């Protein structure tokens, strides 16, 4: 395990994104009103981006070489030049601007906000459309092999399936096995959708075509991020209870818990980057210890 120290970051740390082309990691430091730019080759801080207000989500899009950051504090989306990290645009999205998803094939950016909507933007941040949802969207995933978005709606205990061509909601799958379904991940090869619930702490495996629950496993509490590892055919659930729960995918319908890695209470966000075979976990300052990004290499 390695780590990247963040001694100047205080308060809550939200989501992360990777720029795999330039070996950079970007961290939305919500409580610090900053986005931290990190070099994963040297495990060091490159720069701190300020001019953001309680950033929730962050994304990088290669085609426009831009960094996008949602600001929960004022409902804006701020954009920054990927080379200089200087501001190069902003857009008012709406209250509770939250998670960001990138469609690198169609060069689009999706932003969840408000009581139930996704804003659709082009690669330069121009607003193309808004997709109405029945509740506030939390984590969502953009499929790569089909024009679909899979969106967690914890307030309505459901998952919305959206057509990314027509911007229409095609289905709403009820989540009856638990509440607070925040993180979501996809395995498009085996056509599976993974959802983690907080109350009770359960990991659900859904059929991508029907939404049928095929497996239901106990998992770590206070889950906020969930990743599918296609290299090792595993699932990683990061929970604020202070653990990473790891599952092996034995078949498309069979999953077995194989390990639990201790982290720190409250560390519930992170990022798995298949291109680097690294799992990053954000740890806020605690007990006299500075904030840091912990790095794990799956074997």
Image: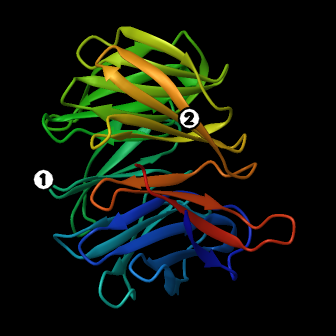
Above or below for 49 versus 95: below
Q: How is the image coloured?
A: rainbow
Q: Which of 205/78 is in front? A: 205
Q: Which of 283/158 is in front? A: 283
Q: Residue at x 62, y 63 (%)?
A: 73
How packed is label 2: few (under 14 Cα within 10 Å), some, or many (20 or more)?
few
Residue 97 visible to an observer of this rendering: no
The numbered mark, 2 or 1, whose residue comes first in the sequence reads 1
Residue 84 image point, x, y percent = 34, 91
Q: Residue at x 22, y 36 (%)?
A: 167
Q: Total of numbered circles in the picture? A: 2
State the residue position of label 2.
259
Say what secondary structure mark 2 lies in: strand
Residue 108 image point, x, y percent = 21, 55
Residue 44 image point, x, y percent = 51, 83
Residue 284 visible to an observer of this rendering: yes
State the residue position of label 1.
105
Above or below for 11 versus 14: below
Say what secondary structure mark 1 lies in: loop
Residue 208 image point, x, y percent = 27, 20
């Amino acid at each position: 395990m390695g780590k990247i120290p963040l001694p100047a970051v205080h308060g809550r740390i939200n989501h992360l994104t990777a720029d795999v082309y330039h070996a950079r990691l970007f961290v939305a430091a919500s409580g610090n009103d900053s986005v931290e730019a990190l070099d994963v080759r040297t495990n060091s801080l490159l720069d701190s981006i300020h001019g953001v207000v309680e950033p929730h989500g962050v994304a990088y899009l290669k085609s426009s070489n831009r960094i996008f950051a949602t600001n929960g504090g004022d409902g804006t989306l701020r954009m920054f030049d990927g080379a200089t990290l200087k501001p190069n645009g902003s857009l008012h999205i709406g209250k509770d601007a939250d998670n960001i998803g990138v469609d690198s094939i169609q060069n689009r950016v999706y932003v969840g906000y408000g009581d139930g909507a996704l804003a659709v933007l082009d690669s330069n941040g121009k607003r193309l459309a808004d997709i109405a949802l029945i509740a506030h969207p939390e984590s969502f995933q953009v499929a790569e092999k089909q024009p679909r978005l899979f969106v967690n709606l914890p307030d309505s205990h459901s998952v919305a399936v959206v057509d990314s061509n027509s911007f229409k909601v095609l289905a709403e799958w009820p989540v009856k096995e638990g509440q607070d379904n925040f993180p979501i991940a996809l395995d498009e090869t085996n056509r599976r959708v993974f959802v983690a619930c907080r109350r009770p702490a359960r990991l659900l495996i859904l059929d991508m075509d029907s939404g049928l629950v095929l497996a239901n496993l106990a998992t770590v509490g206070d889950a906020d991020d969930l990743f599918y590892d296609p290299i090792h055919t595993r699932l990683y659930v990061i929970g604020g209870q202070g653990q990473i729960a790891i599952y092996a995918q034995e078949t498309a319908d069979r999953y077995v818990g194989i390990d639990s890695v201790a982290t720190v209470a409250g560390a519930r966000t992170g990022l798995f980057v298949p291109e680097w075979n690294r799992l990053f976990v954000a740890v806020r300052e605690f007990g006299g210890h500075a904030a840091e990004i912990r790095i794990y290499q799956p074997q």
